[in-house]
Image (cartoon, coloured by chain):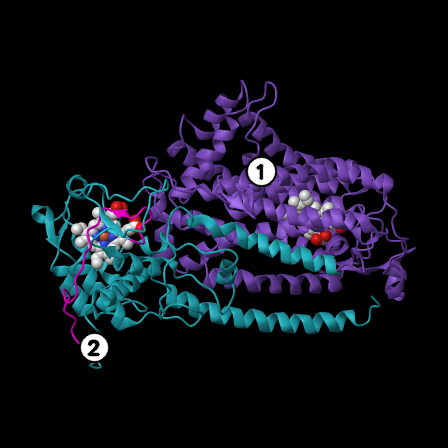
Chain colours: A cyan, B purple
Amino acid sequence: MKMSKIILGALAMSALLGASPSFAAEAVAVKREPWTFAGIFGTYDRNQLQRGFQVFREVCASCHGANLMAFRNLAEPGGPEFSEAQVKALAAEYEIVDPAAEGGKRPGILADRWPGTGQSEADQVAAFGIVPPDFSVLAKARGTPQSFPWFILNYFPGTAYAEGGPDYIHALLTGYEEEVPADIKNADGTPFTLPEGKYFNEYFPGHAIGMPSPMTDGQVVYAAAEDGSTVPQTVDQYSRDVSAFMMWMAEPHLVARKQAGLQVMLFLVLFAGLLYAVKRRVWSKIEH
Amino acid sequence: MSSHESSYVPGSAVEKWLDDRLPIIRWGKTHMMDFPTPKNLNYWWTFGAILAFMLVVQIITGIILAMHYTPQVDLAFNSVEHIRRDVNGGRIIQATHAVGASMFFAAVYIHMFRGLFFGSYKQPREVLWILGVLIFVLMVTTAFMGYVLPWGQMSYWAATVITEIVGAVPVVGNPILQLLRGGFGVDNATLNRFFSLHYLLPFVIAAVVALHIWALHVPGNNNPVGVEVKSSRDTVPFHPYYTLKDLFAIVVFCIPFAWFVFFLPDILGHADNYIMANSQVTPAHIVPEWYFLPFYAILRAIDFGILFLDSKLLGVLFFAGSIVVLFFVPWLDTSKVRSGSFRPIFKWFYGLFVVNFIMLAYLGASAADGVVLGISVADFSKICTAYYFAYFLVVLPLLGRFERTKPLPTSISEPVLAPAAAE
Ligand code: HEM
């Protein structure tokens, strides 16, 4: 049944082709980082998520919201796993608008969502020309273009790739240039000029981004991890940590999902083998 | 309904009592256990069972999702995120439903291409085939409406672009468009009616599937050699032979299914759909889900008008025609020989048709002003669209007249007993 094989292969291909060029536009391919949460055994690095949260809180949170993240999430398994006491104390540092409370405000509790930036959207538009996007699912709302035909590998075990979002964010945060590089041109070949109030970023589609480069080396001071290990305090490291944190925020159950997946796959393979044996046995009496 | 007597003997007084009043167990035994099935069916014939399984999976996961989903434009996006984050097992249920749609379509395309290769649509199975095409139309509609529900950017813009094509129809187009959207633009009313219909249609599909299987059980299955069953030597009872084979196939099918659900739940979709719908911002590249791409490419291929038909209307006609033509395949194919295995020339045209269909999918995903293999997407799409229609309207009618087919075995058992004869 050679023809059948061709058809099956062809159909599988068509399934794969479809999803690919979705990020075509003007996006630039980015370097792949070795994330701990990639692959079938992937898990988040707790220390990294804690550092990423620190970067988020100290740097990004003044402009970006995270309205789907509750304080309690920060203490849940599979995430940054701060202790409940730490998160309670953290929540209490924030004032939450609550019409039911005396004076309309009260200190935060575990069940509260992240309180937002404290700036109105109108102020943000006035300052940046655009509202900075909410972080809740941003890491899944971005990706990186994949070249034909290699994107096909993204779908298969061993070469699977679902980390385009954090890779893009890491690249974006480290992709600022003071001056527009000379080799960047408009579509018509004229030299690229940066519009007023925009910043040049190699990886942002169209290169002109409304976000000023948010970090400098040494800006965030990391405490040593529990085991005493330290990481460099560089923009590159901050970017990697905050990207990982954003991935967790967008996909908080990733670890549990992958662990369940391993069990399900194992079960399916064994069950299929068993059924095949039974089927062979039953059919063995039939000439076919 | 079928050509054989029931072998059911009620095993107890209660069963006998029930059998005299509602012979449902007898019916089940006849149709789900004893049903004589050709013994030479290969694995392409397991996709019907896989599809039935997928329909059940979609309905069950869908009902659970509906318990937590809010069909309101300001809340819909976050309610889906709420399912992923806060509902027990929600991430997996949601991913199963979303990936399930893709798996369902992968299976239905295989099922249809199987039918096209083995001539399963030919006399006496025309009604079975037509019901199948009807199911396909219903599936496309259901999936399209379902994709709008999470109210992401791609949901919104796909809904806008696709409903718009109805507006191209003269006179009735605009009233229908407004009825479909519940207003002038895609908005809350659209979301509400799409949700309502998305919940309804799977049950309509289930009903048509029942007819589909009824229509299967009258003539019985076709088979890979395409020669009708001649005697009971050619068949085996459905149970346990095909219940086991189908079950095995379903479990194997679940392996890639689970792979995507657990390890790559978002890869078959678009990152843009994680951005909430915004009528003010058009995504750089509006692409429908992969399973619509071949038909979308046909729609886009028509960028020219003919006589009084402008390009928009003509595009809609080709788009609709590409599916409507399937209803007529039983009469367009004039060959008496069912199975492609015995049609040496047909095989080539068929193979090209499959490649052409995949090419259409690829073109549907490419930017309209792009270039593929040195040919502009616009021209390439026209060529592929032309072949799509030529296959049905020219190749199938003519081949039946001119092709010299290979000799057929006299019965199903013949090639089974002497494999050399089939080649
Ligand atoms: C929800 C979708 C569908 C379900 C659940 C379904 C179910 C089935 C089942 C259980 C069978 C018998 C087993 C087999 O041959 O695989 C069958 C046969 C068949 N189906 Fe479908 N089907 C669906 C959609 C379609 C579509 C979209 C078409 C074509 C446009 C189609 C055309 C046929 C034909 C021609 C046969 C007879 C095949 C033969 O005996 O050679 N079906 N279907």
Q: Relative to residue A133, is residue B349 drawn left or right?
A: right
Question: Chief secondary structure of the magenta span?
Answer: loop
Give the x, y percent position of residue A151. Answer: 49, 58
Q: Relative to residue B127, is residue B288 drawn left or right?
A: left
Outermost residue on the right side: it is: B410
Residues in magenta?
A: A202-226
Taking the magenta stretch, the answer to whether it contains residue B352 is no
- Do callouts 2 and 1 point to residues on the same chain? no
Q: Residue at x 68, y 61 (%)?
A: B246
Figure quadrant of the N terminus of chain A = bottom right
Give the x, y percent position of residue A92. Answer: 12, 60
**Mark 2 to mark 1: distance in Å?**
58 Å
Give the x, y percent position of residue A162. Answer: 42, 61
Q: Amino acid at mark 1?
A: Asp
Check disc 2 and report the residue beneath it. Answer: A230
Depth check, front residue: B76 or B402: B402
Q: Relative to residue A70, is residue B363 drawn left or right?
A: right
Check disc 1 and report the residue beneath it. Answer: B379
Element under label 1? helix
Q: Is residue B133 above or below residue B42?
A: above
